[in-house]
Amino acid sequence: MKLISLCLIGLVMSNNIMLQTANHSAFKEVFGQFAKSSDFGNKLFGELSEFIQKGATLQDLNDHVEELRKHLADDQTEDEKFFNEQQESLEAGLQGLVNEVEELKEAVDVAAKKISVLNQQQQIIDNLFSQDQSSYQKRLANQNVILETISLLVERANTLQLEGHSLIEKDNLLEEIKQLGRGKHIEVLAQITAHLGNEQAEKVLKLLESLRNAVVASLEADEAKEQENIRLYNKLSGEITASLSESQRHYQQLEEHFEQKEYELRIGKEGVKEVGLKLQDRNDSRQFILDRVREAQELLNDNLDRIARWSQE
């Protein structure tokens, strides 16, 4: 019974002390350092001092501090809800831009590969045309040598038919004819020509003429083929050049569009990040104030007896 009585007495005294008005001088002593600790601490000290001067009880002071704490907690909840919704809205709006940037990047890559393929095709065509030109020039040179040799053979053969040559002169002409054909496609014919008798001269000369005509025809055919190759090369090169020009223009447009959208996406992401940072800054500031409010509560509760007016009486 005594223990119960003591508890009841303690509870009554606790309730009674909360109903006591605060002593301003004692309050200033208890909260003096707190008031100097921060701007908010000084502001809260001023508010509580004003309440005390108006006759506020310890309960009034405690209620005011508790109301501040609850307000800060509610404010944090509302802030987090607002900023989270804002972030989600921004992120949802950015998703379409993210997809667009990815699609543009793929399109830029495809356009770049197309340009690379076109350049490779042009290089292949250039190499083939260069090889063809080189082969044609070699064939042309060889055929011109053959024509020149045929002309010389005809000239020497005609010379052999003329009377008045000494044996030495004839031998020299025959040896010259052999040398003309040596190492060339008409070497056999040159050897035959070198051993001609007068009775076969006309036949061999006709054969040489036929050969010359064949070489000329081959030259003409080669020339026609080469002109066709040049025409085809110019046609293909023109088509590739036109396609390359269009592809480069398209690539440039895509790249500029991609860079613009990528910039917009970067700005958008910075906006989302800024919202998060702003919330963090507000939370940090609010937490500092909340810590000061709790500190004030502890000071008040730990010093009720000192601050209560009855303790001064």
Image: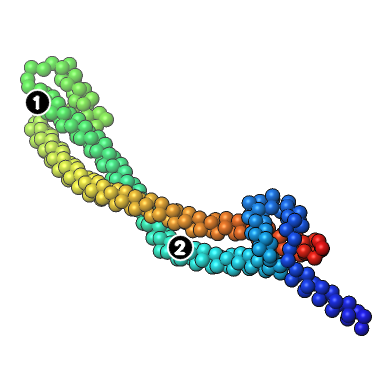
Cα–Cα gap, marks 1 and 2: 101 Å
The amino acid on which the numbered mark 1 sits, given as a three-letter code, is Asn
Image marks 1 and 2: residues in contact by CB distance under 8 Å: no
Q: Is residue 63 left or right of residue 255?
A: right
Q: Secondary structure at mark 2?
A: helix
Task: Determine crowd level at label 2: few under 14, some 14-19, many 20+ residues with C-alpha closer than 10 A.
Answer: some
Q: Nearer the viewer, mark 1 or mark 2?
A: 2
Mark 1 or 2, nearer chain start: 2
Residue on which the image places disc 2? 90
Q: Disc 1 marks which residue? A: 158
Q: Secondary structure at mark 1?
A: helix
Task: State the residue at coordinates (84%, 74%).
Answer: 10
**Residue 178, numbered label:** none
**Which residue is most to the front?**
313
User: Can you say whether 10 is above or below 192 in the image?
Assistant: below
Q: Nearer the viewer, residue 189 or 184?
A: 184
Q: Nearer the viewer, residue 260 or 291?
A: 291
Q: Position of residue 125 (x, y in %)?
A: 28, 45
Asked if one can make out residue 231 in the rendered structure from this viewpoint, the answer is yes
Relative side of 236 to 152, left or right: right
